[in-house]
Amino acid sequence: MKRLLKIPNARWYLGGQTFSLFGDVALWLAMGIWVKELTGSAGKAGLTFFFFGLATLLAPLAGLVVDRLRRRPVLIWANLCGALVVLGLLFVHGRGQVWLIWLIAFLYGTVYSFLSAAQSGLLVSMLDGDLLVDANGFLQTVREGLRLFGPLTGAGLFAAFGGGTVAIMDSATFLIAAGALGFVHVEEERPVPVEQHRWAEVTAGVRHLWRHLVLRQAVIAAAVACLVIGFLESIGFAVVGQGLHRPPTFLGVVIATQGVGAVVGGVMSARSVRRLGEGPVVGIGLLMLAVGSVFFMMADLPAVFAGAIVLGASLPLIIVGLMTLLQRRTPNELQGRVSSAADTLITVPQTLSIAVGAILISQVNYRYLLAAIAAVVSLAGAYLLTRREQWRHDRAGEGGSEATTAELERGPLALAAEAEHFLPDEGAATFETLRAATAAQKTTETR
């Protein structure tokens, strides 16, 4: 981590993101509390997060746009748009404007589709492959660690001054992030458009994920887990209200406790990835999330706090492991589309589960929903941990893995066949040429 923070570009970018993430964490909870207080419904409060996730459907388009542009300018403009979007909350004055909160949540999610895709590409261009895991770990530690006081700040400002004040604060943090990017100097060549059918361009990220076995397994495990993880958005209000008999604002205290675990998980994430590999770390994180869900089933404050800590520690392991895996095994020209494809394949199930959870929370005891989360997430984690491909310690660089001695002994023809399986269509011709050349060489040697 010290080596990362010695790099000026990294300091400016990560510093700006720290402010932005603080505003996000504060406003995220405030919007949910706002809807809960206006409607009295935990389900409708959960729908706030549903509309944020719904914007992920636009992620493939965002990824295509990002891969056609330099990432730094995209990040600056996306932050400026975010600063403007959240100010729309100033027009919410009563229950009749709940729809506006949901609209802002959707636009907020759209902005983040661009931010997420562009950030992935910028980090790959700005940092050496070995520092990627440190940067991802830092960002996730900050994001989750801010739960220690970000939600409390947001809930406190909301209770004292209303949601508009929280929106203004978040808008300011977007502007700080945009300003910090102005001091980031990174050489980015203008992407050269590839002559392809538009549909092939949009789906290039999905095809890369599907053809790369290790990526495919990790995304499948995460997507299956997200089929139920979204229940937590509505369950949180039920745990606080029905289980602990506390007001909705007490959820800020629970989330702050989750931040304690997140700090520990964030600090451990980079070290764990280096020691075990990205996939196993994601699997372990999923199992920890299942354990945290079990603790939430207990109507006991210490047990709920323990569950929040375990759950908080699990999230950085899952996210850092998955993000680093995607970045290391994806060519730079596909970073935006692969990041967006993964976001879509993972967030769409999560968004659907948020909607289902918002409906079920009023029909089913929240403990049954927590039991479903524990069961499904445990299966996803076990699946990933039992895939032997995930335990191979070949460290992938930008878009490929380093060749081991055993691989070199297999010869170029075998490597070509494997590379063609893992790379998208754009690389297939190159390896077909290598295959033909190898065959010709063998013919010559035979003669």
Image (cartoon, rainbow, N blue to C red):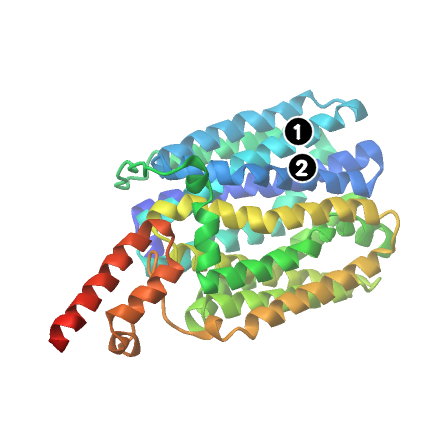
- Determine which quarter of the picture holds residue 54: top right
Q: Position of residue 431 (x, y in %)?
A: 28, 59
Q: How many marks?
A: 2
Which quarter of the rendered picture does the C terminus lie within?
Answer: bottom left
- Look at the image and tell me whether residue 286 can be seen: yes
| Closer to us: 84 or 433 | 433
Tell which circle, 1 or 2, labels the residue nearer the N-terminal end: 2
Type of amino acid under label 1: Leu
Q: Position of residue 325 (x, y in %)?
A: 44, 60
Q: Name the residue under label 1.
A: 103
- Look at the image and tell me whether residue 2 can be seen: no
Type of amino acid under label 2: Phe
Q: Position of residue 332 (x, y in %)?
A: 34, 49
| Closer to us: 120 or 256 | 120
Q: Position of residue 432 (x, y in %)?
A: 28, 58
Relative height, residue 160 to residue 46 (above, below): above
Dot 1 falls on a residue whose secondary structure is helix
| Closer to us: 2 or 367 | 367
Q: Residue at x 53, y 57 (%)?
A: 319
Mark 2 neighbour class, 10 Å CA radius: few under 14, some 14 to 19, many 20 or more? many
Pointer 1 and pointer 2: residues touching (CB < 8 Å)? yes
Relative height, residue 396 to residue 42 (above, below): below
Q: Name the residue under label 2.
A: 51
Q: Relative to 363, is 79 on the left or the right?
A: left
Q: Mark 1 to mark 2: distance in Å? A: 7 Å
Dot 2 falls on a residue whose secondary structure is helix
Q: Residue at x 80, y 63 (%)?
A: 297
Q: Relative to 183, is 87 on the left or the right?
A: right
Q: Which residue is drawn at 41% across and 40% down?
A: 201
Q: Residue at x 25, y 78 (%)?
A: 409
